[in-house]
Image (tube, rainbow, N blue to C red):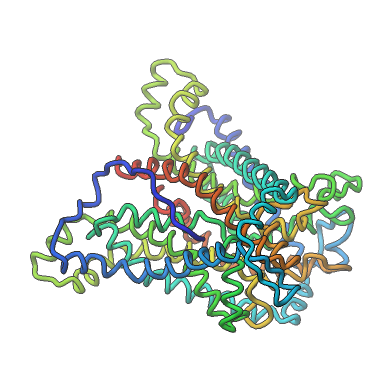
Amino acid sequence: MSGRGGSRWGTVAWAVGAWAAGLFFFFPVLWMVLTGFKREVDAASNPPTWTFTPVLDGYRQVFDRDITPYLLNSLSASLVSTALVLLLATPAAYALSLRPVGKWRDVLFFFISTKMLPAVAALLPIYLLVRELGMLDNIWTMVVLYTSMNLPLAVWMMRSFLLEVPPALIEAAAVDGAGLGTTIRKVLLPLVAPGVAATALICFIFSWNEFFFAVNLTATNAGTSPIFLVGFISSEGLFLARLCAAATLVSLPVVLAGWFAQKQLVRGLSMGAVK
Amino acid sequence: MTQTIRPAPAPARKRPPPPVRGGARDRLIRRAPLLPALVFAIVVTQIPFLVTIYLSMLSWNALRPGERDFVGLANYADVLTDDRLRAALVNTVVLTASAVVVSVLLGLGLAVLLDRRFPGRGVVRTLLITPFLVMPMAAALLWKHAFYNPAYGLINGIVGGSTDWISSYPMVSVVATLVWQWTPFMMLIILAGLQSQSQETVEAARVDGAGPWQVFTRLTLPHLRPYLELGALLGSIYLVQTFDAVFTITQGGPGTATTNLPYEIYLTTFRKFEYGEAAAAGVVVVIGTIIVATFALRVISGLFRMEDHR
């Protein structure tokens, strides 16, 4: 079906169909962004308001209700856990690909199996343990959990990137007398830098959006952005513009990152299986 | 998050290089980079599971302090005969299966649309992936209030009437939100599959007189099979754990109409404080997952062969 020249009308019809589908899926996002700039009365009107003068009331209210600490908590939990994941996963992926340990296959499947098992089965012991340690509502708890959540993905992804490095290159470096450290710094890192970026992106997305552990283990101190949204679940009165402003705000970092890194997104989401 | 699964025997591969049997020192050097990650994963994911097994044998309700008797397998008997949990299991299967199937089908359709040059293809692709990037919690709230709400939701605003979509069609409301978020994911993976299809084979079939539909069903679909499987598998891994959408849109209701296992166990833990029972339910879920995942791992190891055939 693909690649056929077709008639000019065929191409036009195809373009119209594809654009319609794209706009259909995008529409809820557009509606969210638009509603965030409405006055509350217009946001909740029926029939819906299509034309309006944009106002910043929704955003002002969201900041008045102090969304900033929640955004900062999300940012630090996501960034720190992503850095930790990369620090742990990259050497591990190296030991599972370029210079593999004996049972690399078992280890690889061990990692992925930890990802398959439901978080809910670990919630109670983690909750009790964290409470015992006095670490409830602490951002470091989230950092540790997000690191373990993303570690298997990162190991699989980094491994798939490392396997693309031509072995001859590493051998050549060894022949030239480069030590392991130099080989890693001068040969490997430049080659896998895009892979590291893709892995970091995926880990950031999943930590930023994580809700299950956040809602059960954090409150006001370490609450992340999705926790700010919990207050909207059963809101009464006029709040739709405020809700959409907050929803737009918390989604923005990941949406922008995903837009700019579309190529890496596919590879990352498939854990390196699809290039 | 817990427990180990024995992998299915993985197929022979060309890469990576076979591990060389060296001395003890060499083995240690090879293992050193792996150890921090492995130890971290074992400590954070396996120890909680062992604790869960222990807790599952206690009669422990946090509302009755002091009572923490060892009851053996009694909690398991409760869990396996509990109607709520059985309902939750059925709901989990229905929710996961319908969301995965619908999003794979829609994703396939969109991928086929995008697999042809037309003006603005890059923009349309960008528009299409956006729903997947919206925070799931934000997406759930958006659909609940801005679309499904009977008084000011956009659906009633357009089609008229005053249907309360969430109470009338609770499962459909949750699944529709999930499908909206996951279709782009499926589309991306399937599109990558379409673009890896050899154009020469397609041309050759066309020269032999195959129509577009025949090319699609006889050539394209078989070629896409591993990509469809990968999408379905990864989608299931994430969707079976759905919590945000249920928590936000329906709170598992009305009744237990949309209560899935994660939400039910959450209720048992933090609303009823039945720690022993929640732990037993967790263990049962893990065992169920191991059974499903053993099968899934076999699929994965088959799928990852395709990276070697490039």
**Residue A238 lies in quadrant:** bottom right
**Residue A37 lies in quadrant:** bottom right
Nearer-the-camera pick, A55 or A62: A62
Nearer-the-camera pick, A150 or A76: A150
In the rendered image, the quadrant that contains the C terminus of chain B is top left
Residue drawn at point x = 24 percent, y = 56 percent = A102
Residue drawn at point x = 88 percent, y = 66 percent = A41
Residue B114 x, y percent position in the rendering: 53, 41
Residue A196 x, y percent position in the rendering: 37, 65
Q: In the image, A226: left or right of A233?
A: left
Location of residue B129 with respect to A57 vertically, above or below: above
Nearer-the-camera pick, B18 or B123: B18
Location of residue B114 with respect to B157 vertically, above or below: above
Q: In the image, B172: left or right of A146?
A: right
| Residue B94 seen | yes
Residue drawn at point x = 78 percent, y = 51 percent = B256
Residue drawn at point x = 72 percent, y = 62 percent = B267
